[in-house]
């Protein structure tokens, strides 16, 4: 499903393509490098808002670890080191 988008990017000389959030492993296998993205979350319910913030703090650590791990085995990184 990314192939049409990739064709479009190449044909129009674009410098990058954001394949969307989530599912990083299969995107990485297709040549997309992991990058950090930002999102905003807010809830009118203070209790729910606390849980959302706590989850996002925990998730951000896991995401950074995943980015670091994938970056270490990146074909682009390996090519740059040669």
Image: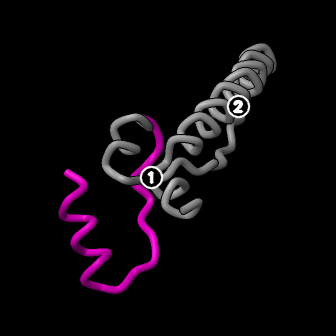
The residue at the point 60 percent across, 39 percent down is 67
Mark 2 or mark 1, earlier in chain: 2
The residue at the point 26 percent across, 65 percent down is 5
Q: Which one is nearer the viewer's eye here, 39 or 44?
A: 39
For the residues labelled 2 and 1, the Cα–Cα distance comes to 24 Å
Would you say residue 21 sits in the magenta stretch?
yes
Please give left or right for residue 47 compared with residue 59 in the image.
right
Q: Which one is nearer the viewer's eye here, 26 or 74?
A: 74
Percent across and percent down for residue 37 are 62, 49
Please give left or right for residue 42 compared with residue 23 in the image.
right
Please give left or right for residue 33 compared with residue 47 in the image.
left
Q: Residue furthest front?
A: 82
- Secondary structure category for the residue under label 2: helix
What is the number of the mark on residue 45? none
Percent across and percent down for residue 18 are 44, 59
Q: Which one is nearer the viewer's eye here, 41 or 72?
A: 72
The mark closer to the camera, 2 or 1, is 1
Q: Is residue 13 above or below residue 79?
A: below
Percent across and percent down for residue 41 are 68, 37
What is the number of the mark on residue 60? 2
The residue at the point 71 percent across, 35 percent down is 42
The crowding category of the residue bearing disc 1, from other C-alpha atoms within 10 Å (few below 14, some 14 to 19, many at least 20), is some
In the picture of the structure, the residue carrying the numbered disc 1 is 75
The residue at the point 68 percent across, 43 percent down is 40
- Secondary structure category for the residue under label 1: helix
Q: Which one is nearer the viewer's eye here, 13 or 48?
A: 13
Residue extent of the magenta highlight: 1-22
Percent across and percent down for residue 34 are 53, 47
């Amino acid at each position: 499903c990314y192939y049409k988008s990739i064709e479009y990017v190449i044909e129009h000389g674009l410098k990058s393509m954001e394949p969307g959030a989530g599912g990083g492993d299969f995107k990485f296998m297709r040549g997309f490098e992991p990058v950090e993205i930002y999102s905003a979350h807010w809830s009118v319910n203070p209790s729910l808002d606390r849980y959302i913030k706590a989850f996002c703090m925990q998730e951000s650590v896991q995401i950074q670890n995943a980015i670091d791990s994938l970056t270490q085995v990146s074909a682009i990184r390996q090519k740059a080191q040669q």
